[in-house]
Image (cartoon, rainbow, N blue to C red):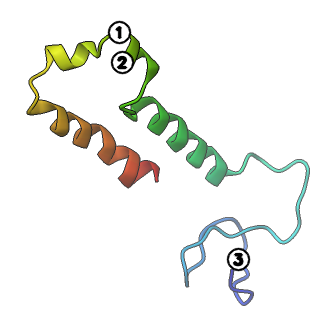
Amino acid sequence: MHPEIVPAGPGTCPICGMALEPREISILDAPNPELVDMSRRFWVSLTIHRDDERPADVLLGRPLDRLLPAAATPWIQLVLASPVVLWGG
């Protein structure tokens, strides 16, 4: 963080865009909005990620592979992976 930036309230640094931290920490502070946002991104990304080695797929004989055409599987993986990488990461 740039020491010459002293804002009146919360926000982002006009030079680098990082979240500004308060100079004094208080127990009564509200929840950190950056932590709340990253936690939400983590849980949403966790629910839509696809892992090819899931135990249910191996034990149940990969039922989705029998229902979907082979050419559609990479496109479905691309659609599911894009938000995880571009938004959640």
Q: Amino acid at mark 1?
A: Leu
Q: Residues within 10 Å of mark 1 (few under 14, many from 20)?
A: few
Q: CA distance from mark 2 to mark 3?
A: 52 Å
Q: Is residue 52 above or below residue 42?
A: above
The residue beneath circle 3 is 7
78 left or right of 19?
A: left
Of label 2 and label 3, which has the lower sequence position? 3
Instruction: Give the residue at x 8% y 33%.
Output: 71
Q: Give the structural element (helix, strand or loop) at label 2.
A: helix
**Picture coordinates of residue 35 (x, y %)?**
65, 49
Q: Is residue 84 above or below residue 49?
A: below
- The residue depicted at 20 percent of the width and 34 percent of the height is 76
Q: Which kind of residue does numbered mark 2 sit on? A: Asp
Q: Spatial distance from mark 1 to mark 3, Cα to Cα?
A: 57 Å
Residues at discs 2 and 3 in contact (Cβ within 8 Å): no
Label 2 and label 1: CA atoms lie apart by 5 Å
Nearer to us of marks 2 and 3 is: 2
> Residue 48: x and y, percent?
39, 32
Within 10 Å of disc 3 (Cα), the crowding (few <14, some 14-19, many 20+) is few
* Number of callouts: 3
Residue identifier under label 2: 57
Q: Is 45 above or below relative to 88? A: above
Q: Answer yes or no: do the residues labelled 1 and 3 have beta carbons within 8 Å?
A: no
Q: Tell me whether circle 2 and circle 1 mark residues in contact (CB < 8 Å).
A: yes
Q: Residue 42 lies in what quarter of the image?
A: top right
Q: Where is mark 1, residue-wise?
A: 60
Residue at 68 percent across and 70 percent down: it is 20
